[in-house]
Image (cartoon, rainbow, N blue to C red):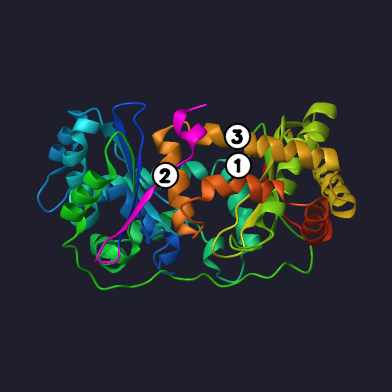
Amino acid sequence: MSPVAAAGLSPVRHALANGGVLLSEHTATHPAVTVYATLDAGNLHDPDSSLGLANFVARVIDRGTESRSPDEIAEALDGRGVSLTTGVTRHLLSLSCTCLSEDIEAIMGLVADVIRRPSFPADQVEKRRTAIVTALRQDQDNPAVVATEGLMALLYAGGHPYGRAGRGTVASVEAISRDDLVAFHRRRATPEGLRLVVVGDVEPARVEDLVDRAFGDWRAEATGAVVPPRVSPAPERRETRHVIAGKPQADIAYGFTTITRDDPRYYALTLMNNVLGQYALGGRLGDNIRERQGMAYYVFSSFDANLAEGPLVVRSGVSPANVDRTLAAIDEEIGTMGRGGVTAAELADSCRYLVGSMPRVLETNAGIASFLHNAEYFGLGLDFDRRLPGLLEHVTLDEVNEVAATFLTPDRAAISVAGP
């Protein structure tokens, strides 16, 4: 167990005058610092006519600024052994890197430059467009991706942003212009939507000084985060099948919409999902479908509560001949848990597993940064690491079985299958 995990976190929160938020955690295990930054600029904000715009911005934002060429950025990073990673989710655009403590001032300045003043060079835009389009075409031939995107379209129909293609389509990406990237950044990259988490061998007071110098004079019109529409559980079962010729494997995505992150049932659903398809070799699903029946190459479940009602998803990869048998087995496990719930022993084992896994989450600076960011984003409090074990341990068997009965109903499942 890391010293930080054993002693608990002690983050310092600093609100910038322009609306940005900084969380600092001092760890002295290694002479390194992780910087993790997010903006309210995820693909939820893509216009319907420009799907994939947020992802495109994330792929080009670090390819040049008003004062640094792409080569200069690369040299500044490579010379310090630093890799800057960018990404995008439904709600957030993120940048992250880890550097030596002695380089934190230079790296903070570079990160601020990339966030605040990207230049979106025309040649870099075209290079990244080619890479994105190539990846999208590869995804069209990937059963796992096609099945998952098909499921999200079923669960979040009617134009809901969670159901749209987050990386866009070949046609939408090819139609995005450099001006679109510039306008999106100007509209969505604002200090009021900035969250910075800095974890490592640097004192919080110094971090505050560096961040105030790098971001304190940033001014931009506040646009606010978009709140996604609410989602109601589906009244009936829906299924779609996508043919991808020549594949040796079929992929299944099976799921339901559930709850938002601030729902008090969150911890009961987390424990239920762990019993269903995560604990040990894949919970009940793995024990039945993969271990006892030998039908699946993999099977697991995941639960992703968010600002809108997030999905609970069962994923499985199988021989094409076993698709219908596997679906029947998933229905059986889902229905059995929905009707009968979990056992007291399963609940106790799942709780011990989740509480016991916390130290592993907090072993690295990057793990701590992600944990603290989520606590800030969802308003969970600076002491969330200390409260989380109790929140899990106080969940009752009745509470877990109630959420199982509410959400695990095969005749309201959405199912997407892709394969030959």
Image quadrant holding the C terminus, namely top right
Q: Is residue 361 visible?
A: yes
Disc 2 crowd rating (10 Å Cα; few below 14, some 14-19, many 20+) is some
**Residue occupied by mark 2:** 10
Which amino acid is tagged 3?
Ser
Identify the residue at the far left of this view. Answer: 67
Residue 33: percent from the left, percent from the top?
30, 35
Which amino acid is tagged 1?
Ala
Which amino acid is tagged 2?
Ser
Q: Earlier in the sequence, mark 2 or mark 1?
A: 2
**Disc number placed over residue 280 in the picture, else none:** none
Marks 1 & 3, CB-CB < 8 Å contact? no
Q: Identify which residue, 274 or 76, lies in the foreground.
A: 274
Of marks 2 and 3, the one in the foreground:
2
**Residue occupied by mark 1:** 144
| Left or right side of 95 for 44 | right
Residue 16 within the segment the image draws in magenta = yes
User: Separation of disc 1 and disc 3 at Cα?
Assistant: 28 Å
Of marks 1 and 3, the one in the foreground:
3
Say which element carries label 1: helix
Marks 2 & 3, CB-CB < 8 Å contact? no
Residue 162: percent from the left, percent from the top?
54, 62
| Left or right side of 115 for 398 | right
Residue at the (60%, 52%) spot, across then down: 304
**Residue occupied by mark 3:** 357
User: Separation of disc 2 and disc 1 at Cα?
Assistant: 40 Å
- Looking at the rendering, the stretch of residues picked out in magenta corresponds to 1-19
Identify the residue at the far front of this view. Answer: 7
| Left or right side of 81 for 161 | right
Count of marks, rendered view: 3
Residue 233: percent from the left, percent from the top?
72, 67
